[in-house]
Amino acid sequence: MSYANYAKEWSDRINKALSAEGQSRDRASQEARAKALLKALPGYLLFCFCEEQKQDRATRWEPLEGIRPAQLYVIQKHHWLPDQAFSLTHEQLQLVLHDELRELALPERAIEPVQADLDAWEMEGVHLNGHHVPD
């Protein structure tokens, strides 16, 4: 079983969010960094949730790649048909799994890359473990 590269996942997500704002990591304003964080964090939490579910539920015949673990989770939790779960976008899955993502206990290796950016960007008052983000 492969292990997630949390640092790469976070870097890709934050860079994409900054790029969408016309910013780069090294030249972004504090406001652009805060916006990028708010944009990147929900998808990153969904990724982390999927990794956790994959570790618990993957099998040789169903390795549960990508967002498949989240889809399986909503099928089982809400008793949805597979087609209903498979039709959800990433943003819709984030909404459906809002409480789970809010309460997700991240492993240290998932926290480290995000915390490194928070520290480097001097974003005080942001607590990743509790998922508190700037206003």
Image (cartoon, grey):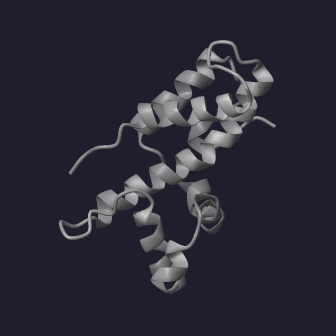
| Quadrant in which residue 88 is drawn | bottom right
Total marks in image: 0
Residue 18 at x, y percent in the picture: 67, 29
Give the farthest residue toward the top. 27
The image shows residue 109, relative to residue 92, as above or below, that is: above
Percent coordinates x, y for residue 20 in the rendering: 69, 34
Residue situated furthest left in the rendering: 60
Is residue 132 in view?
no
Left or right: where does residue 113 sit relative to residue 59?
right
Depth order, front residue of 132/57: 57
Residue in the picture at 62% in, 40% down: 40
At a point 51% along the width and 30% down the height, the residue shown is 11
Q: Closer to the camera, 84 or 110?
A: 84
Q: Residue at x 64, y 65 (%)?
A: 92
The picture places residue 72, in percent across and down from the top left corner, at 42, 73
Evaluate whether residue 45 shows in this view.
Answer: yes
Above or below, 10 relative to 78: above
Q: Position of residue 119 (x, y in %)?
A: 60, 19
Q: Is residue 101 left or right of residue 39?
A: left
Q: Nearer the viewer, residue 77 or 129?
A: 77
Please identify the quarter of the rendering in which residue 135 is found: top right
User: Going 36% across and 37% down the picture, which residue do you hit?
Assistant: 5
* Residue 61: quadrant of the picture: bottom left
